[in-house]
Amino acid sequence: AQKITQTQPGMFVQEKEAVTLDCTYDTSDQSYGLFWYKQPSSGEMIFLIYQGSYDEQNATEGRYSLNFQKARKSANLVISASQLGDSAMYFCAMTQMDTGRRALTFGSGTRLQVQP
Amino acid sequence: ETGVTQTPRHLVMGMTNKKSLKCEQHLGHNAMYWYKQSAKKPLELMFVYNFKEQTENNSVPSRFSPECPNSSHLFLHLHTLQPEDSALYLCASSQVTGGGNQPQHFGDGTRLSIL
């Protein structure tokens, strides 16, 4: 079974600063995918970034980067130059690829508040 | 049309009512999913459909009945729900062929309240 742990229920960051949201995972699969999603108060889940377990480089998408440390089973999201619009819930999730199962297992989320 | 559309956005129903949630995806994906998001709990997978066939039922009570008539449409039929079923119900779709790097695309959700 897979498990995602997000230990920070809430985080505050000043506008224009960088922030790291923590995510650790547990899986017996050799091949898996890690995702981060953003959920504003309106409810929709917005895909941010993906990291494959065999990707050697850390993923980056604009202001988002993923600090992937496979040996430590961590996949932290780094948001650079925070903006007020970044205030939202952030979820780390993973899929199993050994079995081809694509359903996502989610963590409990981190609420990020960006302060002016 | 946005990628994944869910209707209605909000639904209030009594425990004896029957209602249905609808999800439609315009992305050409071949898999669709129902998730439940309750307060203070992580998102929980409910059902998975690949190429219209149900491939996962995550021990969901029978008062929730999914239907997938084609790869673009997914329904969740509700009957005799309980107050603890009040939650945000999210539909998602993805492409399951090819590599596992295909993200799931979510709708805006249906916020369900059971009286």
Image (tube, coloured by chain):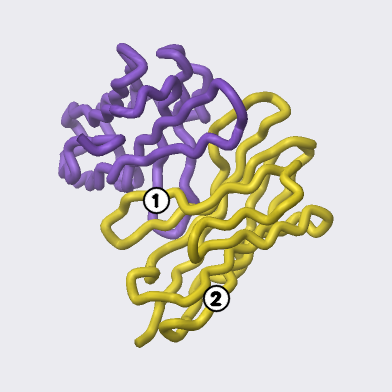
Chain colours: A yellow, B purple
Residue pointed to by mark 1: A46
Where residue A60 sits, quadrant-wise, is: bottom right
Identified at 64% across, 41% down, the residue is A33
Identified at 44% across, 82% down, the residue is A16
Where residue B18 sits, quadrant-wise, is: top left
Q: Nearer the viewer, residue A86 or B63?
A: A86
Q: How many marks?
A: 2
Q: Nearer the viewer, residue A37 or B8?
A: A37
Q: Nearer the viewer, residue A55 or A12?
A: A55
Q: Position of residue B97 (x, y in %)?
A: 55, 21
Q: CA distance from mark 2 to mark 1?
A: 18 Å
Residue, far right: A71
Among numbered discs 2 and 1, the one appearing first in the sequence = 2
Q: Position of residue B1 (x, y in %)?
A: 20, 35
- Badge 1 element: strand
- Identify which amino acid the numbered label 1 is placed on: Ile
Residue pointed to by mark 2: A19
B94 in relation to B53, above or below: below
